[in-house]
Amino acid sequence: MPKRPSLEDRLAELSKLRREPDPAVAKQALAKGLKDRSPHLVAKAARITAELGIDELDDALTLAFDRFMVDPARTDKGCVAKIAIVRALVDLDVRADDTYLIGIRHRQPEAAYGPPTDTAVPLRAASAEGLLVARHPNLGLELTELLTDSEVHARLAAVRVLAASGLTEAEPLLRLKAHLGDAEPEVTTEALAGLLTLAPRRSLPFVARFLNADDPATVETAALALGESRLEDAVELLEQRYQRSVEYRLRQTLLICLSMLRRDTGLEVLLDLVRIGSVEQATHALVALAIHRDDKTLRESVQDALANRSDDDGLQRVFAEEFR
């Protein structure tokens, strides 16, 4: 009796389908793979289905998802198959509303060192994207629930999908999330950044209020959102806040965010600090400018700015370390 191929061998066979010249052969093999009991094999089949753009297998994908929702912690440990299936459906632009609704609400606690780990967090995040693809009428309601999720990556997904959704309720929800704050500053930063993407002119004064907070952590959150925005008007806001700041770490962060904007006016502010600022200011500016170390023109501008100083006090060493 011939020996049954190992899982590794079967996964390798699936990988070969990426180079299969006959689409019908690939489709048939992937359809068979999606019916397998192994979540790892099904996950591989789902990923390749999406890579090859075979949207005719949407029913096979959703049926496989439903199968792994039966006793899910046993049949699909780690949500391996379900996550891959939903991501494939999203990549294929399939309107699998029921699958996405199940996925965004699913929790799968599994044994781990310490408290159980919810392995369904990436599934909820991917399902949120799926509901956006499907333009589901309850998208706003589902994202509101996800905003209060106990897991940070689920909340981040909710914020990002809201910012991309174009929903009328997206802006007030993101403002509310920013006002309420989050245990993880990254979520608040993402909410503010989302607002600057969704409605830049209307949101700039709103974000500026956070930039003027007394709490340095809140200021950093707003500064990072402004730095990611690439908005010209953010240059003046960050520069003014820098001038009023006395806390060492915050001053460095504000200059890095100014550099992140990649606006000529902001880069010129940093170059001026290199030319005529104190040694501390010039050092901070060099660190901030170093994120553009591969830009030959800017590198030369930094060297010229350093050459104009009457003192050195280790700044050439800082430049050498940061721009190597």
Image (cartoon, rainbow, N blue to C red):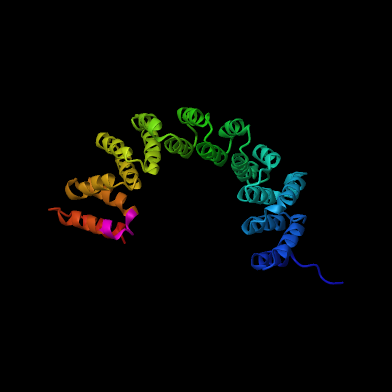
323 vs 97, nearest the viewer: 97
Residue 45 painted magenta: no
161 vs 111, nearest the viewer: 161
Residue at the location (35% across, 47% down)? 260
For the N terminus, which image quadrant?
bottom right
Q: Residue furthest left?
A: 310
168 vs 264, nearest the viewer: 168
Q: Residue furthest bottom?
A: 2
Q: Looking at the image, is 84 positioned above or below residue 6?
A: above
In the rendered structure, the answer to whether residue 209 lies left or right of residue 272 reads: right
Query: Mainly helix, strand or loop, the magenta region?
Result: helix
For the C terminus, which image quadrant?
bottom left
**Rendered image quadrant of residue 196:** top left
Q: Position of residue 154 (x, y in %)?
A: 57, 40
Residue at the location (40% across, 32% down)? 203
Q: Position of residue 30 (x, y in %)?
A: 72, 59
Q: Looking at the image, is 214 positioned above or below residue 128?
A: above
Q: Position of residue 280 (x, y in %)?
A: 23, 46
Q: Residue furthest right?
A: 1
Range of residues picked out in magenta:
292-299
Q: Could one spot residue 196 in this view of the protein?
A: yes
**Rendered image quadrant of residue 210:** top left
Q: Could one spot residue 280 in this view of the protein?
A: no
Residue at the location (74% across, 51% down)? 60
